Amino acid sequence: MHIRNRISDIKKIRCNACQDYLKMVAVEDWKNQLYEKTQIAVKYSPAKYKPAYKIMRTRGIENYEIDDMDVTFISEVIHKCSYIFPSKVETRKAIEQLTEDRNVNGHSDENEECEELYRYAFLSLTNLQRFIDTVDEWETDIPDEIRLEYRQRYSAEIIEMQKSIDEERIDQVQRTKDMDKDIQRILSSDDRLKTWCDVIKIYMDRSFVIDHNIELYQEFILRASNAGIIHAHGQAADYYLNTDKNCDEAEKRMRLLMEDKDNLSAGDVHSIMSAISMYMIRGNVLSDGLEDVVVTLINWGYPIEKDSTGVYVMLSKREKSL
């Protein structure tokens, strides 16, 4: 499993741990009191309260649950609503760190090296364990057996997650070394295109036929594109557009492929248009930047037009002649 998937798992554990803590300290009539607080707070602090307020209004406060809250909102109500969710100052400090961890990953640009993500993962789990320990040590108004069950449950999940990530990290280090060797072989080759074709075939066979692990192929094409291998930009653009839904990054890879207009092949243009067509077929609207990519290719003389459904397609020679 790729480290980005593990980051998602960590976010889920972190959110669940905060939600379960809040359930332990909430007063009996917390829903109505929180709704009254939110009605007022949304006027002067909309960024913090509006998302929760919209859910309350849509579902009705009687159907609003703590499981609907994210870590940021939980931290907010713990700090500002002590009469609804009484907590110790030590716990409030600990959850501030969890909120910071969440926000750091929330501003991720999806281009971090795996090693950076591993460091973030271990630090996040360490901070989460610190929060669990703080709840157990300081929230003594919660019955001991309930705190103990809470601590044991989440500590076990954290330990298991750390173990899995550590094992995957060892495999990732070796995999990265192997990829970098292959990338260097392509870059130092007298015939980069041929070497690229030989190498990418190996990764495609391993990913789609032998190991059935598409992440290996995806990781390699992104790493190769980042290293400046022009032949990887088309596949990288397709990944960012149709898998990652990142129009800006997809446009960047397409423009890298288009930089050398004189050496841009029909196959390169076809890879760009295949990615764009698939994106549109799935009901997505092109960003202004991607629209400009298509217009540029049309101005360069490539046979591209919209079909009857409004999707940009690249015409074959036969279609163009009809």
Image (spheres, rainbow, N blue to C red):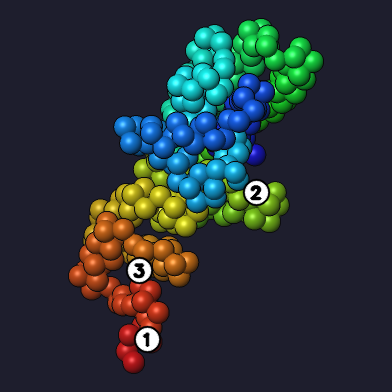
Q: As displayed, is residue 237 above or below residue 282?
A: above
Q: Nearer the viewer, mark 2 or mark 3?
A: 2
Q: Residue at the spot x=46%, y=34% of the render?
A: 36
- Crowd around label 2: few <14 · some 14–19 · many ≥20 (10 Å): some
Mark 1 or 3 closer to N-term? 3
Q: Residue 23's image quarter?
A: top right
Q: As displayed, is residue 55 above or below residue 155?
A: below
Q: Quadrant of the N terminus?
A: top right
Q: Is residue 43 left or right of residue 158?
A: left
Q: Residue furthest left?
A: 299
Residue situated in front as seen by the camera: 196 or 270: 270
Q: As displayed, is residue 186 above or below residue 82?
A: below
Residue situated in front as seen by the camera: 224 or 263: 224
Q: Is residue 49 left or right of residue 123?
A: left
As shown in the figure, which amino acid type bears the numbered disc 2?
Asn
Q: Which residue is mark 1?
A: 319
Secondary element under disc 1, as helix, strand or loop, is: helix
From mark 1 to mark 2, how far is it between C-alphas? 37 Å
Residue 159 percent coordinates (x, y): 71, 21
Q: Is residue 4 left or right of residue 49?
A: right
Whether residue 265 is visible to the viewer of this picture, yes or no, is yes
